[in-house]
Amino acid sequence: MITNEIKEKLRAIVGAENVLDSNIDRFGYSYDSSFVPLVPANNPDVVVRPLTTEEVSKVMALANEHGIPVTPRGAASGRTGGSIPLAGGISLSLDRMTKILEFDEKNMMVTVEPGVRTVDLYNFCADKGLFYPPDPASWKFSTIGGNVAENAGGMRAVKYGVTSNYVMGLEVVLADGTVIQTGGKAIKNVTGYNLTQLFTGSEGTLGIITKVLLRLIPMPKVRNTLQLMFYSLDDACATIHKMLQSGVVPAAAELMDKMSIQAVARHRKLDIDPAIEACVIIEIDGDSKEDLDKQAKQIETIARGFNVAEVRIAQSKQEEEDIWAIRRGLSSAVGAMAPNRLGEDISVPRNEFPEMVRRIRKISEKYNLPIAVYGHAGDGNLHPSVLCDLSNPEEAERVHKAVDEIFAEALAVGGTLSGEHGIGITKRPYTLSALGEGGIRTLKAIKQALDPKGILNPGKIW
Ligand SMILES: Cc1cc2nc3c(=O)[nH]c(=O)nc-3n(C[C@H](O)[C@H](O)[C@H](O)COP(=O)(O)OP(=O)(O)OC[C@H]3O[C@@H](n4cnc5c(N)ncnc54)[C@H](O)[C@@H]3O)c2cc1C
């Protein structure tokens, strides 16, 4: 419990209007976009909304002195429960820290506060002819702080990588309120441990990110979209492999299985041949129209070698939009098929993508549960969605067993528990099998060194 005296001190730091402790406010900060059930025990005692690094530092120093848990929070779009305050205490919302602090055109870098929305940063850079590539599907509401804390990926990861590939430096407030700077604008930097990468993906358990220095790249001049339909999943995957091996690297290569395609078809009233087993949506980019046409031709030729049923190359911006609408509508279309949907996020070596889909099919049959599979096939990141009714205890039991097996199979083919959503609460039971005892001991040693009282986002990752 946080005493009134401590609340008064918090009000003195951030202003009374930025300390929220009504029941409705506490409830509003008790959940995120994961499938973690709502329970009153996850209400924070108080919500604190700082505006500056100095305020964050003072809040942390106070929390550390009194051993109060602090759970940082961006837009709460996380899928694994990362911003849920499991131990009560302070929900530290970074939503007021929304400034783009510096645009360094010569070095092609930008410094931002953590609460800047991903799409706003993209648009800000695009206006200046520069490109910030990480594009989580949640980019219209996710924050850069949350993206860094989760090392978010997106559709363009296959060509341009994920958030960590663009983070050059950070300002971080440690558990005791100390403010540190990591990295910097020098491209080559091997001074000490790479703390920038340590904090990237640390899910709010090691420090509060208060500034982010990001590198940018030139904006591709032109883009286009292709849609390929296949009668077999193996042919779809083989096309993507061959394409990457032959040096045609698309900006995005998204794959959907039959259940996902039919879900979108129903939802958007599209007429899609029921014999189609896989749909691949590809984005290509480059410097000129000729360059794009050449890439599109190469992809079409490769796909024809693998019995593609249909090749559609967008002829207009509208057609591009129509094709991407299929992918963007997927989550809600699949979600509409059952009372509950447990969306997972596993990542496997690229060549194991079709094998992993086959193993998920077997799990689906074994537990008699529909599982739609889609994902970023270009980089081996799959999102199996278990469609179910969790109000039925017997079915819920089957769902949990099926999810356990999906993780076990992902590890068995050399993959990981998470490609982009992090571990948070939901994947915590599986970290030991993924990292081993030595791995977990190492993570704990780092945590102990940076947060000896264990106040930062307790209960997450392990
Ligand atoms: C519809 C939908 C689609 C999505 N698509 C993708 C996708 O394509 N790719 C992808 O990678 N993810 C995706 N996500 C997941 C989610 O959007 C990302 O994990 C995102 O990075 C979270 O950002 P956020 O601002 O919402 O962070 P939150 O959910 O608020 O927090 C996420 C974690 O970061 C910590 N945190 C937040 N801010 C800070 C900070 N300043 N300092 C320290 N720790 C902090 C929190 O404690 C928590 O552990 C999707 C989610 C939804 C709902």
Image (tube, rainbow, N blue to C red):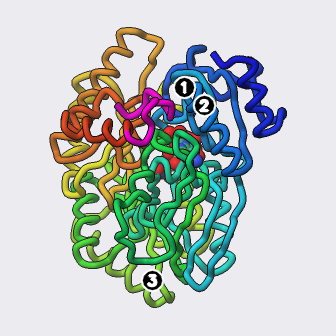
Residues at marks 2 and 1 touching, judged by CB atoms closer than 8 Å: yes
Is 456 on the left or on the right of 422, as rendered? right
**Mark 2 → mark 3, Cα distance in angstroms:** 55 Å
Ranked by sequence position, the earlier of labels 2 and 3 is: 2
Q: Position of residue 149 (x, y in %)?
A: 49, 48
Residue 83 visible (yes or no): yes
Give the quadrant of the C terminus: top left
Q: Is residue 450 magenta?
A: yes
Prevalent SS, magenta region: loop
Q: Position of residue 317 (x, y in %)?
A: 61, 72
Q: Crowding at label 2, few (<14), some or many (≥20) Cα neighbours within 10 Å?
A: many
Q: Classify mark 1: helix, strand or loop.
A: loop
Looking at this view, name the residue that lies furthest to the top: 393
Is 198 on the left or on the right of 86, as rendered? left
Give the quadrant of the N terminus: top right
Question: Compared to 306, does 381 lie above or below?
Answer: above
**Mark 2 → mark 1, Cα distance in angstroms:** 6 Å
Q: Which residue is mark 2?
A: 63
- Residue visible at 50% across and 64% down? 169
Question: Compared to 146, does 359 lie above or below?
Answer: above
Q: Which span is picked out in magenta? A: 449-462
Please state which of the two labelled residues, at mark 2 or mark 3, is closer to the viewer: 2
Beta carbon at label 2 within 8 Å of ligand 1 = no
Q: Classify mark 3: helix, strand or loop.
A: helix
Amino acid type, callout 3? Leu
Q: Which residue is mark 3?
A: 292
Ranked by sequence position, the earlier of labels 1 and 3 is: 1
Q: Classify mark 2: helix, strand or loop.
A: helix
Question: Between 218 and 270, which is closer to the camera in this rendering?
Answer: 218
Q: Position of residue 67 (x, y in %)?
A: 54, 25
Q: Is residue 35 magenta?
A: no
Q: Which residue is mark 1?
A: 67
